[in-house]
Image (cartoon, grey):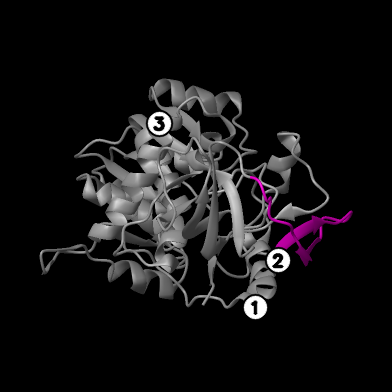
Amino acid sequence: MKGLYCKPGDQGDVKFVSQETNVPTNIGDHQVKVQVKSCALSPVDFKLYEDLKLEKEHVPVGREIAGVVLQVGPKVAFFQPDDEVVGILPLEAEQSGLCSVVVTDEYNLVLKPEKVSWFEAAAVIKDGLRAYTALHTLARMAAGQTVLVLDGAGPFGVLAIQLAHYHGVKVLATALSPEDQKFLEELRPSVGGIVYPPSARVIRVWDSKEDLVDSCLEETGGLGVDIIIDSGVKLFDEEPEAQRHCPHKHDLLTLLSVGGHWVTTEQHLQLDPPDSHILFLKAASLSFLNDEVWTTSRAKQGRYLHILKDVMDKLCTGTFRPQLEDPVPLYEATVSMEMVQSKQTRKRIAVKL
């Protein structure tokens, strides 16, 4: 049985290799053997593996999986053979999600609703978890607030917009291209056959004539936004081309309302004393979004499984409607993963026919 693994190089380059993997013949008391039907291809964070002392010669690729239970351990309480499940393999997992069969603890999985396809389940499970972590756990969103979602057309941004709109939050979202703008303007919730207005007010950051700060302050009557969820921050004036649409940290501090929450994905964010003073004057807060804490720490295991289940429920009822590209056949997984890792394309989903 082959799986896809990546090996970091000395010069920062990454090589993806397909190699044979053995499935354990004996499984633990609380483990489940799953036949994988679909697997999401997301970028591998090698720095996180290094920080958590989980460095390996070959890092497994594909941790968001959906499949059918083949066998359960003697003390497994949540599942039985033939159940359809979805989940996220932990960072310390030895097997790639692209293997035909994986073994994992039952606490990493939840049941997949029958109406949800394998493709959608693997695509949404982790980005849905990130959206919940950002908006509920960190920002404590409430109806009537205003949230700014940067890169709203990305896989994570789309679900964050839909989750915020579901809870009665006004949404502003940035579009990085005309195509993203068109998609976001057509992103309309539909309940009971009734199509509602667009889920978000779109800000065209790709257009030099439209200013992010001015647009947000105009939409909020000069009060600023209650919640900011970024997708990267420009720390210095001279940044790589890949960050040309990322806002400067000073812009986001300006946008933040009194008592607001800034949820950042920028793990190297540096705040100077004047920046901290602005947060102090606004009684605002800054949180770092790292959804991997749910699997690296079992302190809130029950809440984690509840979130995963609710993500699937919202996908089943149509609250979550992800933007998905065509599925990737297994023989194209290596090439697709190289493109995902180098950020030439967004997340892709490999489906096993």
User: Which element is circle 1 on?
Assistant: helix
Number of other residues with Cα within 10 Å of mark 2, as a class: few under 14, some 14 to 19, many 20 or more: few
Residue 212 part of the magenta segment: no
Region in magenta? 1-26
Q: Which of 176 and 344 is in front in this view?
A: 344
Number of other residues with Cα within 10 Å of mark 1, as a class: few under 14, some 14 to 19, many 20 or more: few
* Kind of residue at badge 2: Met
Question: How far, Cα to Cα, is label 3 from label 1?
Answer: 37 Å
Residue indicated by mark 2: 1
Residue 243 is tagged as: none
Task: Give residue 139's quadrant in the image.
Answer: top left
Residue indicated by mark 3: 302
Vertical order, 265 against 286 (above or below): below
Question: How far, Cα to Cα, is label 1 from label 2?
Answer: 17 Å
Residue 4 part of the magenta segment: yes
Horizontal side of 54 relative to 119 (left or right) equals right
Mark 3 vs mark 1: in front: 3
Badge 3 or badge 1: first in the primary sequence: 3
Q: Which residue is drawn at 53% across and 56% down?
A: 34
Vertical order, 266 against 212 (above or below): above
* Kind of residue at badge 1: Glu
Mark 1 vs mark 2: in front: 2
Residue indicated by mark 1: 332
Badge 3 or badge 2: first in the primary sequence: 2
Q: Nearer the viewer, residue 87 or 165?
A: 87
User: Which element is circle 2 on?
Assistant: loop
Vertical order, 178 against 148 (above or below): below
